[in-house]
Image (cartoon, rainbow, N blue to C red):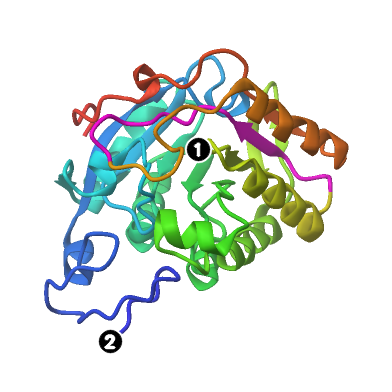
Amino acid sequence: MKCDICPRECKLNNDVLAQGFCGYSMIERKKEIKLARAALHFYEEPCISGTNGSGAVFFSGCNLRCVFCQNHNIANCKVGKAVSIERLADIFLELQEKKAHNINLVTPSHYAYQIIDAIKLAREKGLSIPIVYNTSAYDSVETLKALEGYVDVYFPDYKYADSKLAGELSRAENYPDKAIEAIREMIHQVGMPVVENGIIKQGVIIRHLVLPGNVRNSKAVIDRLVSEFGTDITLSIMNQYTPIEGLKLPGELGRTVTEREYNKVLDYAFDKGLVNGFFQDGETCKESFIPAFDYEGV
């Protein structure tokens, strides 16, 4: 049978341990959820992190697995501790007790249905802060429809407008179109951002990471987003690309983004009429900004 939780549509058997691209089989995902960290996180956009921090829950495995991933140890399932749906619900409540502004689900796509069950259970026990779905946007529209009413804030990437680049770096040539379809569904569900006292309560923020040597792709990303959704979108343009030691990185991915490259992308966004969003200033491309995946809070 086919696993249709994401656009990969891996051919998997429901009752055997054949692994999908995300690193897990269907039967494994039914029995348990693997986490690498659940703690307050202060390095998201200001309306996500606020002053108290975002309650970031990092899931092990990934359905995109970019070759340059800064979280490659968890994306490749090298790090992950199994928890039950009941434990995941309790983790949400513990983060709320620590005054987190939201529950930030990081790389959650392959666990979407288990997450729904955990949110239901946690809400029955008093969970009231927003749920943030922090995703690559390589999501099935049908899966996103199942999440309606459970997710308050969608926090998708739009990594590539170039299908060839998406194939080379993420083995997903259909990413540009599939991610647009996903973001369209997200906007349909929760609309543009609603911010109260500096903290987002509902809506979609789209992220784009500028890659070294790929300004043309970033400009094409901006063109595609404006063409599809207009200039009212909220776009976070990031310069924090960090080449990770030990990874075999093609092309110019072994270096950081230059100030000139980043400013070219920002200027292009402004010229296109984008006024809502975030940009990064200063030295953000440091491995110290990558959290320790040491099972804290799990």
Q: Secondary structure at mark 1?
A: loop
**Residue 1 numbered mark, or none:** 2
Would residue 129 appear left or right of 177 to someone viewing this image? left
Name the residue at the bottom extreme: 1
**Residue 128 numbered mark, or none:** 1
**Residue 193 numbered mark, or none:** none
Q: Is residue 161 magenta?
A: no
Three-letter amino acid code at the position of disc 1: Ser
Residue 269 percent location from the top left of the image: 78, 38
Would residue 187 appear left or right of 268 to someone viewing this image? left
Residue at position x 55%, y 39% from top? 213
How dense is the environment of label 1, judged by Cα within 10 Å: few (below 14), some, or many (20 and up)? some
Residue 180 percent location from the top left of the image: 64, 62
- Which one is in front, 253 or 49? 253
Give the mark, 2 or 1, whose residue is nearer the N terminus.
Answer: 2
Q: CA distance from mark 2 to mark 1?
A: 37 Å
- Which one is in front, 223 or 25? 223
* Segment colored magenta: 231-247
Q: Secondary structure at mark 2?
A: loop
Residue at position x 32%, y 59% from top? 114
Residue 93, picture quadrant: top left
How dense is the environment of label 2, judged by Cα within 10 Å: few (below 14), some, or many (20 and up)? few
Residue at position x 40%, y 20% from top? 289
Name the residue at the front extreme: 251
